[in-house]
Amino acid sequence: MTATTDWQAQQYVLFENERTRPVRDLLAAVPATDVRIAVDLGCGPGNSTETLAAHARGAAISGLDSSADMIAAARRRLPQCQFDVGDIATWQAAGPYDLILANAVMQWVPDHERLFPSLVTKLAPGGNLAVQMPDNLDEPAHRLLREVAAHGPWAHRLAGVERTMRHGAAWYYGLLKPLCARVDVWRTVYHHPLAGGADAVIEWFKGSALRPFLAKLDAAEQSAFLQRYRDEIAAAYPALDDGTVLLPFPRLFIVATR
């Protein structure tokens, strides 16, 4: 990614506890095995890598992310691990790995029909591929994001920015089962309590879904876009009496054992 589209680590970790909980749940479902070599694909600022290190104590752990900003944050956080800037789609490391983790990143990477089997080939026998992806494109936050993008003076520049690649649990099970001894797929809806009403929801998505849109707008357009989006979010996610918004967030989980 270029500097203008970098995932900013500081923004991402505003909700670190909420963003880290799914990876803890994911790793808790990985079969108990001896993990000597593990990698965190899309490691972000290192919060998922830190969870991986706690899960696989003593393992040699590396991380990969397309954002130099994220990698710099991960290196500061976990200097004992190897972190590199790179693209998951063209990642060439041969392995074999005992555990490949991909937490909240594969939704940004194309061609899963090729990529997922390729990752399985990098596993050692008995090794595990553990993936968690947001499954929230039908949620109001994403529907409204598409609508605001399509009905403003910025529409021509934002056409095609919203991610649309999506497969269901059955598709991933069918893809991976012929290649694996075991495939476990499930879906969980988290309800994240965000203090601060609609503004907190905006801050959440500034660390993820909003960034590709904002990167294509100048400062004045960003302000106008965010105000319009905020108005829609406030109506779609009314705050509770104490000002908290419960943000529903569906996520898809996959653990595939070679």
Image: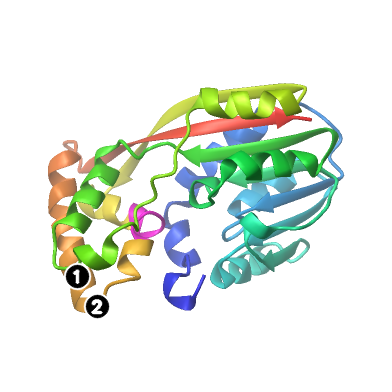
- Vertical side of 135 occupied by 69: above or below: below
The disc at residue 223 is 1
Secondary structure under tag 1 reads helix
Q: Residues within 10 Å of mark 2 (few under 14, many from 20)?
A: few
Q: Is residue 216 magenta-colored?
A: no
Specify whether 181 is left or right of 252: right
Name the residue that disc number 2 marks: 219
Q: Residue at x 37, y 62 (%)?
A: 211
The location of residue 25, given as percent across then percent down, is 58, 32
Q: Quadrant of the C terminus?
A: top right
Q: Where is residue 203, by image quadrant?
A: bottom left
Magenta segment boundaries in residue numbering: 204-211
Instruction: Tell me the amino acid under the disc marked 1.
Output: Ser
Do tag 1 and tag 2 residues touch (Cβ < 8 Å)?
yes
Q: Where is residue 124, by image quadrant?
A: top right
Specify whether 241 is left or right of 201: left
Residue 30 in sight: no
The disc at residue 50 is none
Q: Residues within 10 Å of mark 1 (few under 14, many from 20)?
A: few
